[in-house]
Image: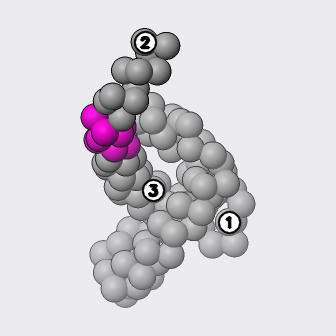
């Protein structure tokens, strides 16, 4: 009964501590996601250069394999379905940047920006 009394007497402090812990965990997850997105941009660019167009499944598999090798330990618990969506989001953003940057277009496909 002492434990229950302790909880009842300190419920507001316990709730506050839980809120702080949740906010801290969310901040770490957001930081990890930002790092992973930067890595994904680089990886999808390299996959596009290496495999070319028309090889979507191969590029996706390559990027996912590489992100699991290179990502922080926390990223290794991300479900594959979530990671696939993130790769697609990174690819969409990357394509927009590639279209605006002739240097990257040339890097991916030499002679493409000439």
Of badges 3 and 2, nearer the viewer stands 2
Circle nearer the viewer, 1 or 3: 3
Question: What residue is pinned by disc 3?
Answer: 40
Marker disc for residue 56: 1
Which of the numbered marks, if any, corresponds to residue 84?
A: none
**Nearer the N terminus, badge 2 or badge 1?**
2
User: In the rendering, at what x and y percent does residue 76 appear?
Assistant: 53, 36
Residue 28: x and y in percent read 33, 43
Answer yes or no: is residue 88 visible.
yes
The magenta segment? 12-22
Q: Spatial distance from mark 3 to mark 2, Cα to Cα?
A: 51 Å
Residue highlighted by disc 2: 2
Residue in the picture at 56% in, 44% down: 78
Number of the front mark, 2 or 1:
2
Front-lying residue, 113 or 67: 67
- Neighbour tally class for label 3: few under 14, some 14-19, many 20 plus, Cα within 10 Å: many
- The residue at 37%/78% (across/down) is 97
Question: Which of the marked residues, 3 or 2, is nearer the chain's N terminus?
Answer: 2
């Amino acid at each position: 009964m002492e434990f229950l009394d302790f909880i009842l007497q300190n419920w507001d402090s316990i709730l506050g501590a839980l809120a702080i812990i949740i906010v801290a965990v969310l901040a770490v997850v957001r930081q990890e996601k930002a790092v992973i997105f930067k890595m994904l941009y680089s990886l999808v660019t390299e996959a596009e250069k290496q495999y070319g167009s028309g090889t979507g499944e191969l590029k996706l598999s390559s990027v996912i394999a590489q992100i699991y090798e290179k990502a922080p330990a926390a990223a290794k618990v991300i479900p594959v379905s979530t990671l696939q969506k993130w790769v697609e989001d990174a690819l969409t953003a990357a394509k927009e940047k590639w279209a605006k940057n002739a240097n990257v277009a040339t890097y991916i496909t030499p002679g493409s920006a000439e």
